[in-house]
């Protein structure tokens, strides 16, 4: 026997194949390694499937938790990457590599239970990236994540988070991309495409309506189908069209009474039959609840054995289900084909990963910093308190551990810094923690940029009176407010820990008080009318301290715009009570976020799309023309101020019989020198003009007048035009020929 055949024999025996079966197969048909197959990804997948034994097929349908959990009872496969989220064995006989999986929404994460943490570059939060309204920046962010993942030997990344912000207290909102399906889908899709430009697979998650962490393993999301199509599902649809992810991760919660990972409406009717998705569906870790029901509904791979122990997709259970006729052999083959297809399509065979490759942390930190600067939102700036004047000789910095670093969000997306936790020991120190501050101090970065100023620091909440005394002596005060959020918990819509009282005391002591927020989403601001300036910095990532300092000093002109509405009070929300358990009826339907506020006449604290600059912009000369099934809005934007800056030009559309008075129709971020004018063509997706009627499945818009408006936010609109449109119908399987430029 040749050395190559000895290796194949050893690999096959480790997978449970008999020596006789392997030798018989080799005698009958020569083995064609995966890399040697020819044709399209579908053809190569079919050729590989034809060579696989049943045991090999079943191997691809089950994944392991990549980190020992708990070590005394479960040992992760030794081939799994250290501290990783998951591992699926490969098929050595055919040259099919393992799937090495890492959480990677914000960067390449390490699981909290790992003995050694992988130091990697943390991006700003997903919500911060969405606040840039810049798909090119999101692509660059994804490309950076993917490059570090490839260097670590990961070929499947568990990112692409696109769940809409139905519940602003959701502890995972910081991972997601806001409340509007068009913005969320475009931004998540761009980041997915960036990840996969490294020839690895990205997921899109969590499919679907996984909009709170309370009771996430059992809660039942109930949304009328038409409303669901126009909101949460539209966000996923756009993200899949633009990003072409290799995998979809189904969610923990139930949807319409069934667990998302065994919901045929989601996994087969919508995802496969209508959207034509060719890849595979993996479960979230522990989100599978059955064998035959899940497989027949459209789940292809159960993830995370070890973290979960039911082992629904074990070879034993799947084999028995096939033998009993509960799952057909054709379904097993289809599941395997769906896994093989993206393995070929995204380069896992032809460009395999390997561990231990070099990482340019300096370049990647610069990517993170650019993202943080582009996503920070100047919410308020009365009397032009910002940027910090060159004549400000004494500045007080108070609170938020700004002398040490910047806050990050917790849970499975936690990226550990290339350095130490700047503020260790804050509870919780274990799951869903630890609470991690990246070692990028806003205080120290401000001192670098303002060397002639005296900048003093006070911790704040322990002694608000001392902080107020320090504030009274300063020319300008910077108060840092923080709120930690994480997977597995929901959070109040407030800063907490006495920070509101601290800000009130400081504002009373000094009229030039600036509040810098590091939060995972919206928070209430009872002090908003008492301070002249507010900056939302989100969780700003590994270089967040430098980014904050550059925004505050004017080295960078802020250009972020809100991807979510900031309410004035809890009673403005569709569901003001605490996040619910059991049946969660989203009776607001598709009126999510700003649409709810517009529909009910609520005046938000800061509206969706809002964001100020240190310069001013004028948007005018709006012209709207039909374009295929949609529209194109042609508009001019001019920088009328004295600083270079970037504006996000937003187009809103109004129609008849909609869930709300207006919808976001399109947008474009544009950079302008002082006095410069640019002409923009902003393309409006026809689905944004339409309604989904369950009685006639598809996208329908009636004949009549539609109003198109352009402006700086959902509540600051300028030019409007009315255009008459004929009736139109787009079937469920419709998708744009290519993404709009």
Image (cartoon, helix red, strand yellow):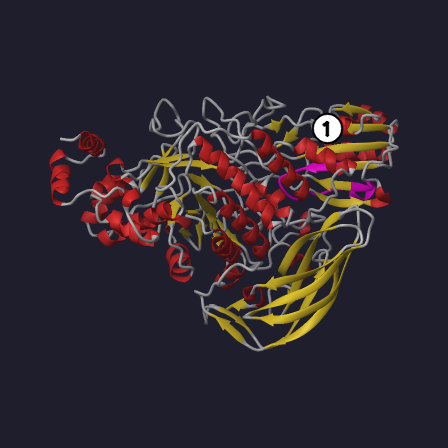
**Residue 104 seen in render:** no
The range drawn in magenta is 515-533
- Expressed as whole percent of the image width and height from the top left, the position of residue 149 reads 47, 35
Position above or below: 429 against 490: above
- Expressed as whole percent of the image width and height from the top left, the position of residue 680 reads 67, 60
Residue 350, quarter of picture? top left
Left or right for 340, reference 377: left
Residue 518 belongs to the span the image colors magenta? yes
Position above or below: 377 against 409: below
Q: Which quarter shows the N terminus?
A: top left
- Expressed as whole percent of the image width and height from the top left, the position of residue 436 reads 59, 28
Please give the name of the residue rendered at 79% of the width and 50% of the height, measured from the top-left corner. 674
**Residue 711 seen in render:** yes
Q: Which element type, helix, strand or loop, lies under badge 1?
A: helix
Q: Which quarter shows the C terminus?
A: bottom right
- Expressed as whole percent of the image width and height from the top left, the position of residue 109 reads 50, 33
Residue 275 belongs to the span the image colors magenta? no
For disc 1, the marked residue is 445
């Amino acid at each position: 026997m040749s050395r190559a055949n000895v290796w194949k024999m050893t690999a096959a025996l480790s997978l449970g194949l008999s020596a006789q079966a392997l030798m018989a197969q080799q005698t009958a048909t020569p083995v064609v390694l995966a890399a040697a197959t020819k044709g399209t990804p579908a053809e190569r997948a079919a050729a590989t499937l034809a060579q696989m034994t049943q045991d090999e097929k079943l191997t691809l349908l089950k994944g392991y938790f990549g980190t020992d959990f708990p070590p005394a009872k479960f040992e992760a496969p030794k081939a799994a990457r250290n501290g990783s989220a998951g591992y699926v064995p490969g098929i050595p006989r055919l040259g099919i590599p393992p799937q090495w999986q890492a959480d990677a929404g914000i960067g390449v994460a390490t699981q909290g239970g790992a003995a050694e943490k992988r130091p990697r570059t943390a991006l700003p939060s997903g919500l911060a990236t969405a606040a840039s309204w810049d798909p090119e920046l999101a692509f660059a962010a994804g490309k950076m994540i993917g490059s570090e993942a490839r260097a670590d030997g990961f070929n499947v990344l568990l990112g692409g988070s696109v769940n809409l912000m139905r519940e602003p207290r959701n502890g995972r909102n910081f991972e997601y991309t806001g409340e509007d399906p068009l913005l969320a889908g475009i931004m998540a899709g761009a980041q997915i495409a960036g990840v996969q430009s490294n020839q690895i697979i990205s997921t899109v998650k969590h499919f679907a309506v996984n909009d709170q962490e309370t009771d996430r393993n059992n809660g039942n999301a109930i949304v009328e189908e038409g409303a669901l199509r126009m909101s949460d599902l539209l966000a996923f649809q756009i993200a899949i069209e633009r990003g072409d992810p290799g995998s979809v991760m189904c969610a923990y919660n139930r949807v319409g009474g069934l667990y998302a990972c065994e919901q045929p409406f989601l996994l087969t009717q919508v995802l496969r039959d209508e959207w034509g998705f060719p890849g595979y569906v993996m479960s979230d870790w522990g989100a599978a609840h059955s064998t035959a029901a899940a497989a027949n509904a459209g789940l292809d791979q159960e993830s995370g054995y070890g973290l979960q122990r039911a082992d629904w997709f074990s070879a034993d259970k799947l084999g028995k289900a096939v033998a009993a006729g509960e799952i057909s052999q054709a379904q097993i083959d289809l599941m395997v084909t769906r896994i093989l297809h993206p393995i070929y399509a995204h380069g896992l065979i032809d460009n395999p990963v390997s561990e231990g490759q070099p990482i340019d942390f300096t370049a990647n930190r610069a990517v993170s910093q650019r993202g943080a600067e582009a996503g920070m939102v100047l919410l308020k700036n009365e009397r032009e308190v910002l940027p910090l004047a060159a004549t400000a000789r004494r500045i007080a910095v108070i609170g938020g551990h700004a002398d040490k670093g910047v806050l990050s969000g917790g849970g499975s997306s936690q990226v550990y810094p290339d350095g130490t936790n700047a503020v260790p020991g804050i509870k919780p120190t274990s799951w869903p923690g630890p609470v991690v501050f990246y070692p990028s101090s806003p205080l120290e970065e401000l001192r670098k940029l303002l060397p002639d100023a005296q900048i003093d620091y006070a911790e704040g909440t322990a002694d608000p009176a001392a902080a107020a005394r320090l504030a009274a002596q300063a020319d300008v005060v910077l108060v840092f407010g923080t709120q930690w959020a994480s997977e597995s918990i929901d959070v109040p819509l407030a800063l907490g820990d006495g920070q509101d009282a601290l800000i009130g005391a400081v504002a009373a002591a000094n009229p030039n008080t600036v509040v810098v927020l590091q939060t995972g989403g919206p928070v209430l601001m009872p002090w908003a009318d008492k301070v002249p300036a507010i900056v939302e910095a989100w969780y700003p990532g590994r270089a967040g301290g430098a980014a904050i300092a550059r925004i505050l000093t004017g080295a960078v002109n802020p250009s972020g715009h809100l991807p979510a509405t900031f309410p004035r009070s809890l009673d403005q929300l569709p569901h003001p009570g605490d996040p619910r358990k059991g049946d969660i009826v989203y009776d607001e339907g598709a009126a999510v976020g700003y649409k709810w506020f517009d529909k009910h006449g609520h005046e938000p604290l800061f509206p969706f799309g809002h964001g100020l600059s240190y310069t001013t912009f004028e948007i005018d000369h709006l012209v709207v023309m039909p374009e295929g099934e949609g529209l194109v809005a042609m508009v001019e934007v001019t920088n009328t101020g004295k600083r270079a800056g970037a504006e996000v030009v937003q187009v809103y559309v109004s129609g008849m019989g909609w869930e709300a008075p207006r919808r976001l129709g399109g947008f474009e971020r544009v950079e302008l020198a002082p006095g410069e004018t640019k002409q923009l063509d902003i393309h409006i997706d026809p689905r944004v003009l339409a309604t989904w009627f369950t009685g006639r499945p598809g996208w329908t818009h009636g004949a009549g007048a539609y109003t198109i408006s352009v402006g700086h936010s959902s509540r600051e609109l300028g030019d409007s035009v009315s255009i008459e449109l004929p009736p139109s119908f787009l079937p469920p399987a419709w998708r744009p020929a290519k993404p709009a430029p």
